[in-house]
DNA sequence: ATATAACCTGGAGTTAACTCCAAGTCAATA
DNA sequence: TATTGACTTGGAGTTAACTCCAGGTTATAT
């Protein structure tokens, strides 16, 4: 697969794909005779994984570390597991915060909806 | 309340509190004779609201707009409601992405846990 | 043969959201 | 009275994560 195909498929810009490769967020991609990237199926699975994690706000630095450890082989299994657990726990915290904000927004939206206008001044923003 | 008290109470640095005020994320805080900020209970509720929204990743820009509209009075009620709904919908999307990433992390952690080491090479990172 | 389009590189620029700093004021304390 | 510590300001600096760009190469279409 070419870079533009991968870019389209995963909705990640070619610049970002090259950037990810440069910083070690995905492995070095094979180049054909003209120095042009050819993405394998496995590359794509890496990319999809990174997209999922980044979409959830997991930091690039943590992913780089994880991927670096992975490439170092089986001796890093415990270290990798530790990273996964840390990130999972962050994720849980963040989801909790977001759910609280969501409830609050829903409550406020409901108030905006059920009130017959004009609204009295007591409709505070918080 | 002084700035350092508010800072401690909400775990937001004094610099950030001043910054929030400067950019209009919270209202202008009353100053005593010496130009020193004195936060009221209502200021604190604003701050707590902002903290909740920021903690959920809602952008400063959206919050500024919302707060600006709020201060303009009842004629902006529809516009405010629109912002709330937009942000709520973003939040829902993000929570969904995070839940997917969470499931994936949990799955991977389980694999790391249940496998008897040394792990065969098929333990792919994605 | 030349124009077009897709790719390459290394490095600079951008954005959001803080975070830090120098220089100054003021009240309270030793 | 001198120092300490909490506060003030405007502006500069930082960080993460891209995003853009200039200048160059190559394969394909006209």
Image (spheres, coloured by chain):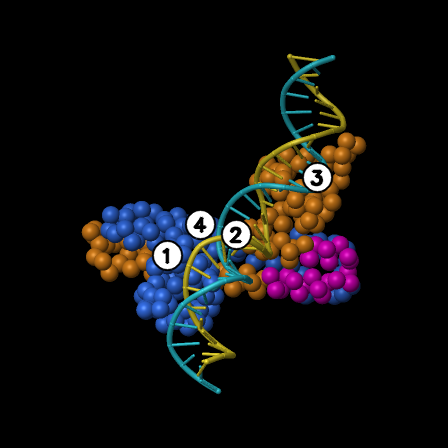
Chain colours: A blue, B orange, C yellow, D cyan
Q: Quadrant of the N terminus of chain B?
A: top right
Q: Magenta residues?
A: B65-87
The kind of secondary structure the magenta stretch mainly shows is helix
Q: Nearer the viewer, residue C22 or B41?
A: C22
Please name the residue shown 76% across and 40% down the image: B30
Q: Which mark is residue A90?
A: 4
Q: Nearer the viewer, residue A87 or D15?
A: D15
Q: What residue would you read off at disc 2?
A: A97
- Tell which circle, 2 or 4, labels the residue nearer the N-terminal end: 4
Distance of label 1 from label 4 (alpha carbons): 11 Å
Distance of label 2 from label 1 (alpha carbons): 19 Å
Q: Which mark is residue B49?
A: none
Distance of label 3 from label 2 (alpha carbons): 25 Å
Q: What residue would you read off at disc 1?
A: B105
Helix, strand or loop at mark 2:
helix
Please name the residue shown 37% across and 56% down the image: B105
Q: Same subunit under labels 1 and 3?
A: yes
Q: Which mark is residue B39?
A: 3
Q: Same subunit under labels 1 and 4?
A: no
Task: Give the side of residue B1 with respect to residue D18, left or right.
Answer: right
- Tell which circle, 1 or 3, labels the residue nearer the N-terminal end: 3
The reply to whether callout 1 and callout 3 are in contact (CB within 8 Å) is: no
Q: Same subunit under labels 2 and 1?
A: no
Q: Same subunit under labels 3 and 2?
A: no
Crowd rating for badge 3 (residues with CA inside 10 Å; few <14, some 14–19, many 20+)? some
Distance of label 1 from label 3 (alpha carbons): 43 Å
């Amino acid at each position: 697969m070419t870079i533009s195909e991968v870019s389209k498929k995963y909705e990640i810009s070619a610049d970002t794909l090259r950037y990810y490769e440069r910083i070690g967020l995905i492995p070095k991609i094979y180049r054909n005779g003209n120095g042009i990237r050819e993405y394998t199926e496995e590359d794509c699975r890496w990319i999809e994984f990174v997209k999922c994690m980044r979409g959830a706000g997991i930091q690039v630095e943590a992913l780089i570390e994880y991927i670096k450890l992975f490439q170092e082989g089986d001796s890093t299994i415990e270290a990798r597991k530790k990273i996964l657990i840390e990130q999972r726990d962050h994720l849980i915290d963040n989801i909790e915060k977001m759910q609280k904000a969501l409830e609050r927004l829903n409550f406020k939206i409901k108030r905006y909806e059920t009130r017959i206008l004009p609204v009295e001044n007591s409709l505070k923003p918080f």
